[in-house]
Image: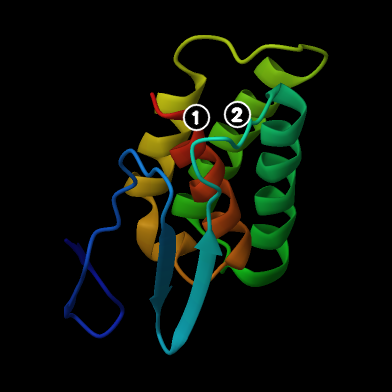
Amino acid sequence: MAADDRGGQEPTVRFGNIHGSAVSIGGSNNTNTVHQGGAGAASPGAAELLEAVLTLREALVREAPRGAERTALDAELDGVAEQLEGTETIRPGVVARLREALQRWAPLVETVSAAAALGSLLGALGG
């Protein structure tokens, strides 16, 4: 758990394998629900994942406070975006890297709805 501004503890968010279910992410009186398709749904490609990463990056600029944590997350998202640009397939390790980044900076992204969408894509990709 991470300490919040009030000295208390905030819960840690973890994204595991999610198949054919709805995911609800929220905190601070903000809940975002993402519904994922069943077994017949196609896995997202690199372009869709890149779009979700860039959307989250833009949302963080608008909604998240500036600081060392956001700077580190911004750098991580920028690095992943570079790996995804111009490719048709998702390179090994990218999904795990994104999942770890969302878990590490969960308190920062928990109220950003774009994080829920990215989490849903990561769930659809497995790994």
Q: Position of residue 107 (x, y in %)?
A: 37, 64
Helix, strand or loop at disc 1? helix
Tell me which amino acid carries mark 2. Ser
* Residue designated by label 1: 125
Q: Quadrant of residue 47?
A: top right
The furthest residue to the bottom: 29
Residue 43, label in figure: 2
Q: Position of residue 60 (x, y in %)?
A: 64, 59
Disc 1 + disc 2, Cβ < 8 Å: yes
What quarter of the picture does the N terminus occupy? bottom left
Residue in the foreground of this view, choosing between 3 and 98 = 98
The crowd level at tag 2 (other Cα within 10 Å; few <14, some 14-19, many 20+) is: some
- Relative to the observer, which residue lies in front, 38 or 16? 38
Coloring applied to the structure:
rainbow
Mark 1 residue type: Leu
Q: Please name the residue shown 72% across and 67% down the image.
A: 62
Q: Position of residue 2 (x, y in %)?
A: 22, 62
Residue 105, image x, y percentages:
39, 52
Element under disc 2: loop
Image quarter where the C terminus lies is top left
Is 32 left or right of 4, judged from the image as shown?
right
What residue sits 59% from the left and 54% below the top? 117
